[in-house]
Image (tube, grey):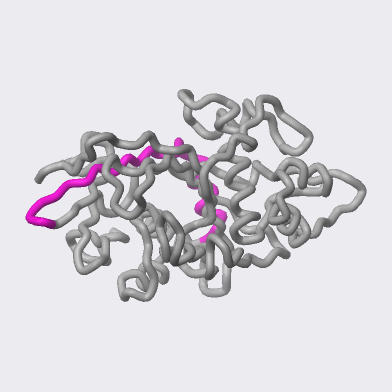
């Protein structure tokens, strides 16, 4: 099997994703957003809210709009090679993107008023107000303690789904009570709460499209019965780093993960299969759909 390598791999861009969870009558659900069909990357694919790290997300010192100091956020991320400003910025970016893309804001009031208008907060961003300025204007403090680092995904040297490369930190968080998720009709055109396994079944049946990081993450989440279980597991681990390695054999593209015999990292990083194969326009384990949950 031959590795797939580009002539000059692009340096991945720092980015953040937040996997928002809620407990429903039938079990735990996760929020998925459908990317716009005309988007430049991952068009039409269902994803978790997220996006690239903006320079304004990086801060050097703790401020009144963070609920814990930068040093604590740096330590929680578990990346000694990442500077504190970037580590803090990744937490901020995850929360900012959640507000921009699905209208959910994990924040708390700091003034006398113990409630805030999340629709107004989102509207202020859409009108061009910087995120920090909006927080100051509404007297809000970000609830970074609600975020738990979950995993770190780096786009393969030869991307399969997107033409760009990203170094994405996945966080998990319970969706804020009393707020309603709603796509922005710009970057995203649909939003849905769905059980992780049900989302994968819809993908298997061709009803939705998913990228490999979402497939593997949903398979991981499907092993948990509640949001509390996911958050506990996240806080008891160091987030694994996953840099998939792609191979071609007999015209079939295969993506391998740490722990696979073909991968350069021998230690397993995730439960479930260690490789996905692309055939019939779907990524799936060699041993069939149910292997995602073994």
Image position of 107 with respect to 152: above or below: below
Q: Nearer the viewer, residue 40 or 45?
A: 40
Image position of 238 with respect to 31: above or below: above
Does residue 48 appear to the left or right of 68 in the view shown?
Answer: left
Q: Nearer the viewer, residue 189 or 73?
A: 189
Image position of 80 with respect to 287: above or below: above
Residue 90 % position (x, y): 56, 38
Q: The C terminus is located in which quarter? A: bottom left
Does residue 145 appear to the left or right of 257 in the view shown?
Answer: right
Residue at 47 percent of width and 29 percent of height: 79
**What is the quadrant of residue 191 in the picture?**
bottom right
Does residue 72 appear to the left or right of 216 in the view shown?
Answer: right
Outermost residue to the left: 250
The reply to whether residue 37 is visible in this rendering is: yes
The magenta-colored residue range is 226-251
Residue at 31 percent of width and 75 percent of height: 205
Outermost residue to the right: 112
Q: Is residue 237 magenta?
A: yes
Q: The N terminus is located in which quarter? A: top left
The reply to whether residue 268 is visible in this rendering is: no
Residue 171 % position (x, y): 52, 46
Q: How many marks?
A: 0
**What is the quadrant of residue 290 in the picture?**
bottom left
Residue 211 % position (x, y): 36, 58
Q: Is residue 207 magenta?
A: no
Residue at 52 percent of width and 54 percent of height: 19
Q: Nearer the viewer, residue 189 or 85?
A: 189
Residue at 78 percent of width and 35 percent of height: 64
């Amino acid at each position: 099997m031959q590795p797939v390598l580009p002539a000059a791999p692009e340096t991945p861009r720092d980015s953040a994703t937040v996997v928002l969870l809620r407990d429903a009558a039938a079990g735990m659900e996760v929020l998925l957003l459908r990317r716009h069909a005309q988007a430049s990357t991952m068009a039409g694919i269902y994803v978790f809210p997220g996006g690239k790290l903006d320079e304004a997300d990086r801060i050097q010192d703790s401020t009144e709009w963070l609920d814990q100091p930068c040093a604590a956020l740096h330590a929680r991320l578990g990346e000694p090679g990442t500077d504190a400003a970037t580590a803090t910025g990744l937490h901020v970016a995850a929360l900012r993107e959640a507000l921009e893309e699905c209208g959910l804001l994990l924040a708390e009031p700091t003034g006398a008023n113990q409630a805030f208008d999340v629709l107004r907060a989102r509207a202020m961003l859409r009108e061009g107000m910087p995120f920090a300025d909006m927080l100051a204007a509404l007297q809000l403090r970000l609830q970074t303690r609600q975020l738990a680092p979950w995993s770190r995904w780096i786009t393969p040297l030869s991307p399969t789904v997107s033409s760009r490369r990203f170094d994405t930190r996945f966080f998990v968080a319970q969706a804020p009570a009393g707020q309603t998720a709603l796509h922005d009709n710009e970057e995203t055109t649909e939003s849905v709460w769905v059980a992780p396994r049900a989302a994968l079944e819809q993908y298997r049946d061709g009803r939705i499209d998913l990228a490999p990081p979402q497939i593997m993450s949903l398979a991981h989440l499907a092993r948990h019965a509640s949001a509390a279980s996911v958050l506990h597991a996240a806080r008891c681990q160091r987030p694994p780093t996953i840099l998939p390695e792609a191979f071609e054999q007999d015209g079939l593209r295969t993506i391998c993960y740490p722990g696979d015999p073909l991968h350069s990292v021998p230690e397993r990083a995730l439960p479930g299969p260690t490789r996905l194969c692309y055939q019939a326009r779907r990524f799936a384990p060699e041993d069939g759909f149910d292997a995602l949950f073994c």
